């Protein structure tokens, strides 16, 4: 079982903590209230907000639900705003979260302001993936394998996917994934959420 932490790149860690703190304060939530809602200790939340602890993907998901925000809220803020905002994300404007412990990098492809559907580019190091604990989330997930050999387990069914293969499933079903190849895997990942955030 995971200890609730992962290794985010150090230059990302402080900014992520600040964004989480700002989201909490905007909602007039105390650390104690957010702790209750997310089932994450006050001490752990404090460390995350101060950039002292790197949260795991699981903790970020619990925070996302507790704060009622899309996953995109945790990515670096866009600095170069344009008339295309809300419609187009240019290649040079994408934000990323890199988790070295699980070998997973999530690059946000969706423009800001779209919480019902998020598009991500997942880059997964050899042997990397979503972790050992299965995921569940209200909504739908789907994707398209661009590169690599990708194992997707949904319930007890294992799917081995190759470049050009696509998938879609009810994400309330327990699921996890990993890269089986010796090279990076790249997956276009789409999340449609049925819950607030």
Image: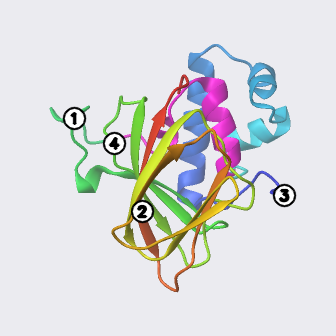
Q: Nearer the viewer, residue 93 or 50?
A: 93
Does dot 4 land on a helix, a strand or a loop?
loop
Q: Nearer the viewer, residue 61 or 176?
A: 176
Q: Which residue is mark 1?
A: 87
Across and down, in percent, residue 51 comes to 66, 47
Evaluate whether residue 50 shows in this view.
no
* Distance between mark 2 and mark 4 Cα atoms: 15 Å
Across and down, in percent, residue 107 comes to 42, 55
Q: Which residue is mark 2?
A: 187
* Vertical relation: 19 (above or below) 100: above
Q: Which is more N-terminal, label 3 or label 4?
A: 3
Q: Which residue is mark 4?
A: 110
Q: Which is more N-terminal, label 4 or label 2?
A: 4
* Distance between mark 4 and mark 1 Cα atoms: 8 Å
* Distance between mark 1 and mark 2 Cα atoms: 22 Å
Does dot 3 land on a helix, a strand or a loop?
loop
């Amino acid at each position: 079982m995971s200890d609730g932490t992962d290794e985010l790149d150090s230059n990302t860690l402080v900014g992520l903590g600040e964004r989480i703190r700002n989201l909490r304060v905007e909602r007039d939530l105390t650390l104690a209230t957010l702790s209750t809602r997310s089932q994450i200790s006050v001490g752990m939340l404090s460390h995350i907000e101060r950039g002292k602890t790197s949260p795991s993907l699981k903790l970020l998901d619990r925070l996302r639900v507790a704060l009622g925000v899309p996953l995109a809220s945790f990515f670096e803020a866009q600095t170069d705003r344009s008339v295309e905002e809300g419609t187009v994300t240019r290649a040079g404007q994408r934000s990323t979260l890199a988790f070295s412990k699980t070998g997973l990098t999530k690059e946000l492809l969706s423009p800001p302001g779209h919480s019902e559907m998020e598009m991500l580019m997942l880059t997964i190091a050899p042997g990397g993936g979503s972790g050992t604990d299965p995921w569940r989330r209200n909504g739908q997930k789907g994707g398209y394998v661009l590169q690599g050999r990708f194992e997707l387990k949904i319930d007890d069914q294992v799917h081995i996917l190759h470049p050009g293969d696509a998938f879609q499933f009810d994400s309330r079903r327990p699921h996890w994934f990993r890269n089986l190849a010796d090279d990076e895997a790249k997956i276009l990942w789409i999340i449609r959420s049925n819950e607030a955030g």
